[in-house]
Image (cartoon, rainbow, N blue to C red):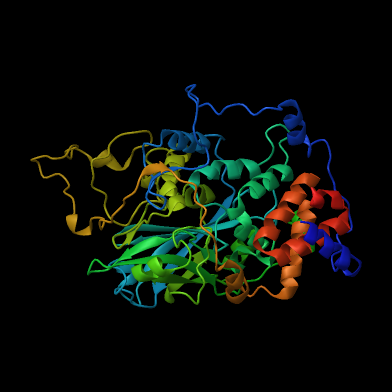
């Protein structure tokens, strides 16, 4: 750090950063600092059953890159408790339309949606923001979500994406802590940047997403000008039972456009529902937004030879590595006829995969396979798949019965157990999950894979210019200028250890804004 201070002292008189304010800490901002003063010794983590917990940041898996295990009761208990923390409030918008398949990709997958070109399927879409609470404006700097439900002849395929190609974390055990750190403080009910940056600096894998968040990408011009990325890695299975690994992209045909901090602040005050009104009004006017669905495919050989873990959602897949194919064009041409029925009732679940698409050992994806359905059972009830927005085009025949809000005849007098001798529904073994090997010690592994491709891909694939790089540093500094100086110092150390040039520029901006040099020497 002394070399960093030496650099700052040299360049500070010529610095190009002008924040224009000093650190803005107040009583609400210091709530966690006051708590730490009164709680000088951390208490032992204890489950709701009164049992000591051995590890609360790493999930249980078969080997360091193996699948998660359902016997990890603390993890699943925490997931279910998190899903029920709040009375559900969905700050979202949606629309419907179609996808027209433009390329036959049957050599990669038996999924019929990939097997024929020039065919259309119905689609419903949902747009949201990760930290959207009632009353918060659309244009806050945040991670955005866009999800599409494809109604195919093989069932519903749900593709849930975010507007950055990477995610915050790689182990799902940290997800609940991430959301708690980003949500309002439990005492003040106000956003707490100390909590956010305390989490970021304790979890270095958040660096890639933080750079996207504080880049121009962090505030899209509209939902229509937002790309989508699965971030999770899926398996594709072809007719020869060959396995390929895939990430899905949704590329806006309106162009990727963003707005400045000043524009975002103006819209937050004059039209806090700007994204929603923009999407609705453009569809109403016949200016139908569209996206190209793409798939980025890696072979098994690619997976073994890659210098990074392709199943880690904090790792970016450079477009120069592996092959990218167009799948089809998604067009949204219909607004909701009733918001509650068409938008509020819709439920997306990454576990909804048609034959030919399978999960991988991606830990975040594995947790989502359970978490989404569990959350929807709490929000919409056990029979949410019967609702119009979620019902498949196929007639449903199975052994599920009863439950709250069960309708559509409850499958009448059909036999309700299996195996039976009365012509009840039978399985289709030809579409069974392709087996894969999982071996290794069952334990909680600390995943510390290094990203070796991120920074070059950030510039080459996502057109981050040197001018935008300066804006990233400025946005980071403006945000960090509102947190405790000790956290500013930790953030500088974090970025400096990974990207020294970024660390130098960030330290210079913070010192110019008033951070005492003594913190960088600590």
Q: Position of residue 324 (x, y in %)?
A: 44, 75
Q: Position of residue 195 (x, y in %)?
A: 69, 42
Q: Position of residue 59 (x, y in %)?
A: 45, 42
The residue that appears at 56% across and 35% down in the rendered structure is: 87
Looking at the picture, tell me which residue is in the foreground, 6 or 66: 6
Looking at the picture, tell me which residue is in the foreground, 348 or 389: 348
Q: Position of residue 189 (x, y in %)?
A: 71, 36
Looking at the picture, tell me which residue is in the foreground, 439 or 298: 439
The residue that appears at 80% across and 46% down in the rendered structure is: 485
Seen in the picture, residue 51 relative to 235 is either above or below; the reply is above
Find the residue positioned furthest to the front: 2
Quarter of the figure with the N terminus: bottom right
Question: In the drawing, does residue 444 fall left or right of residue 457?
Answer: left
Residue 401, picture quadrant: top left
Question: In the drawing, does residue 62 fall left or right of residue 280?
Answer: left
Find the residue positioned furthest to the top: 50
Seen in the picture, residue 139 relative to 518 is either above or below; the reply is below
Find the residue positioned furthest to the right: 13
| Figure label count | 0
Looking at the picture, tell me which residue is in the foreground, 461 or 36: 36
The residue that appears at 32% across and 71% down in the rendered structure is: 108
The residue that appears at 55% across and 51% down in the rendered structure is: 169
Visible residue check, residue 454: yes
């Amino acid at each position: 750090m002394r070399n960093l201070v030496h650099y700052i002292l040299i360049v500070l008189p010529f610095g190009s950063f002008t924040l224009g304010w000093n650190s803005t800490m107040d009583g609400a901002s210091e709530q966690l600092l006051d708590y730490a003063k009164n709680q000088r010794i951390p208490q032992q983590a204890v489950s709701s059953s009164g049992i000591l917990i051995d590890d609360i940041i790493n999930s249980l898996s078969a080997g360091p890159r193996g699948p998660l295990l359902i016997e990890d009761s603390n993890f699943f208990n925490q997931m279910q408790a998190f899903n029920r923390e709040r009375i559900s409030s969905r700050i979202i918008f949606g629309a419907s339309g179609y996808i027209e398949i433009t390329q036959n990709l049957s050599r990669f997958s038996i999924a019929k949606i990939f097997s024929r070109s020039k065919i259309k399927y119905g689609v419903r879409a949902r747009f949201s923001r990760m930290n959207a609470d009632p009353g918060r404006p659309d244009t806050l700097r945040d991670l955005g979500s866009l999800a599409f439900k494809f109604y195919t002849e093989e069932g519903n395929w749900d593709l849930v994406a975010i507007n950055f190609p990477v995610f915050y974390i790689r182990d799902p055990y940290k997800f609940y802590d991430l959301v708690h750190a980003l949500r309002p403080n439990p005492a003040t009910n106000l956003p707490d940047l100390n909590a956010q940056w305390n989490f970021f600096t304790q979890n270095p894998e958040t660096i890639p997403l933080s750079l996207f968040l504080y880049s121009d990408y962090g505030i899209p011009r509209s939902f229509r000008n937002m790309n989508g990325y699965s971030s999770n890695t899926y398996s594709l299975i072809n007719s020869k039972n060959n396995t390929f690994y895939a990430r899905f992209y949704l590329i806006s045909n309106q162009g990727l456009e963003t707005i400045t901090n000043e524009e975002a602040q103006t819209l937050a005050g004059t039209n806090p529902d700007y994204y929603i009104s923009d999407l609705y009004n453009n569809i109403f006017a016949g200016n139908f937004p569209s996206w190209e669905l793409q798939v980025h495919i890696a072979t098994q050989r690619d997976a073994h030879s890659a210098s990074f873990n392709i199943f880690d959602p904090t790792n970016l897949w450079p477009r120069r590595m592996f092959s990218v194919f167009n799948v089809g064009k998604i067009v949204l041409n219909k607004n909701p006829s009733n918001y509650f029925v068409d938008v509020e009732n819709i439920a997306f679940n990454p576990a909804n995969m048609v034959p030919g698409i399978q999960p991988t050992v991606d830990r975040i994806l594995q947790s989502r396979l359970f978490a989404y359905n569990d959350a929807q059972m709490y929000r919409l009830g056990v029979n949410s798949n019967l609702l119009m927005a979620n019902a498949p085009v196929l007639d449903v025949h199975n052994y599920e019965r009863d439950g709250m809000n069960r309708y559509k005849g409850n499958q009448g007098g059909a036999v309700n157990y299996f195996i039976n001798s009365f012509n009840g529904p039978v399985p289709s073994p030809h579409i069974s999950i392709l087996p894969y090997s999982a071996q290794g010690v069952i334990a909680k592994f600390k995943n510390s894979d290094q990203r070796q491709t991120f920074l070059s891909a950030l510039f080459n694939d996502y057109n981050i210019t040197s001018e935008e790089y300066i804006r990233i540093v400025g946005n980071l500094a403006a945000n960090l200028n509102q947190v405790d100086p000790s956290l500013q110092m930790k953030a500088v150390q974090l970025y400096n250890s990974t990207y020294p040039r970024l660390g130098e520029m960030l330290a210079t901006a913070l010192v110019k804004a008033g951070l005492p040099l003594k913190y960088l020497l600590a």
